[in-house]
Image (cartoon, helix red, strand yellow):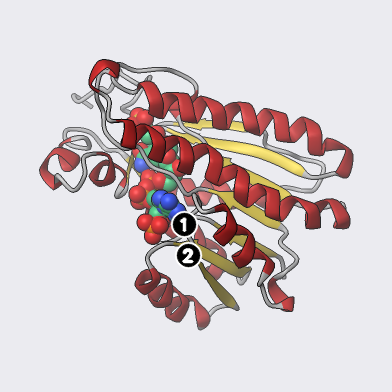
Amino acid sequence: MKTVLITGATSGIGRATARFFAKHHYKLIICGRREDRLAELQDEFSALTKVHTLNFDVRNKKAVAQSIRSLPKEFENIDILINNAGNAHGLDPIENGDVDDWDAMIDINIKGLLYVSKEVIPGMIERKSGHIISIGSIAGKEIYPNGNVYCATKHAVDALNQGMRMDLNQYGIRVGAINPGMVDTEFSEVRFKGDTERASNVYKGFEPLKAEDIADVIYFVVTRPYHVNIADLLILPTAQASATLVNKKL
Ligand code: NDP
Ligand code: 8X3
């Protein structure tokens, strides 16, 4: 059975994706900072498959390298990498932006994705096989007011998806991105720093995507025959037509 490593598996899209893969008996490496959640998920998935947890902050390049290099033998050949860990921090006009928020988004969404990929790619090259999926966003295709730095990080994910696909093509490694619109997860709670009322307002008045909708698509993407690489997908709730146009009358 194939081995899949999922970053940001403690919540939202990553957790739903881990559940999907567990149900289909893939060997799972689940990553995140919240150790208690990793332990709960390990308990939940262990009835279905083999699970290993890695507890690191993707910003910490030493911890990323040490964790991935410490994988037990039966988990060390990673077939599928899902670069999902990420968040928005704040939603402010550029002149009021908080430098710590900018650092967090750049360090997690771009540099963290690179640190993890850097550790996983050599094994894929050696085996001349592998599949890397990065979770971008509609914010990587469009910019919206006050989205400035978050949108920039997701545009970077778009660029890295294209660049990695070109560079890894010679090794037969598949590379693709899934770019969701609005998905009801902990994303807005993190963006608004625990202001749950503001966060829940984001998804009021229309039916947003669920984390499971994205997990379902990720599973579809990785189960295509080897000659099929789904390189780039934009997935929106039906009510959402663009980053800023959401129909609340549907
Ligand atoms: P959640 O907040 O529910 O999940 C984010 C996950 O990322 C958590 O598991 C969290 O784990 C992990 N994470 C965050 N920071 C770090 C860090 N420094 N180190 C390690 N792990 C980290 O949000 P989503 O599920 O919605 O987000 C998943 C991805 O989807 C993100 O890349 C996001 O940008 C993208 N996305 C989300 C959309 C949405 O509307 N929800 C739309 C488009 C894209 P922990 O805190 O335990 O470390
Ligand atoms: C998350 C979706 O619209 O808040 O990437 O940027 S959005």
Ranked by sequence position, the earlier of labels 2 and 1 is 2
Q: Residue at x 32, y 37 (%)?
A: 100
Coordinates of residue 219 in the picture (x, y in percent): 58, 53
Coordinates of residue 243 in the picture (x, y in percent): 36, 21
Q: In which quarter of the image is the N terminus?
A: bottom right
**Residue 25 visible at all:** yes
Pointer 1: what residue?
57
Coordinates of residue 13 in the picture (x, y in percent): 43, 51
Q: Is 158 on the left or on the right of 86, as rendered?
A: right
Distance from disc 2 to disc 1, alpha carbons, whole Å, reads 21 Å
Q: What residue type is labelled 2?
A: Arg
SS category of the residue bearing label 1: loop
Image-quadrant location for residue 72: bottom right
Q: Nearer the viewer, residue 249 or 58?
A: 58
Q: Which residue is drawn at 56% across and 32% down?
A: 157
Q: Is 219 on the left or on the right of 105, as rendered?
A: right
Q: Is mark 1 within 8 Å of ligand 1?
A: yes
Q: What residue type is labelled 1?
A: Asp
Discs 2, 1 touching: Cβ within 8 Å: no
Q: Residue at x 74, y 50 (%)?
A: 121
Image-quadrant location for residue 92: top left
Pointer 2: what residue?
19
Number of numbered labels in the structure image: 2
Image height check: is 160 above or below 216?
A: above
Can you tell which mark lies on residue 194? none
Q: Quadrant of the C terminus?
A: top left
For disc 1, the neighbor class at 10 Å (few under 14, some 14 to 19, many from 20) is some
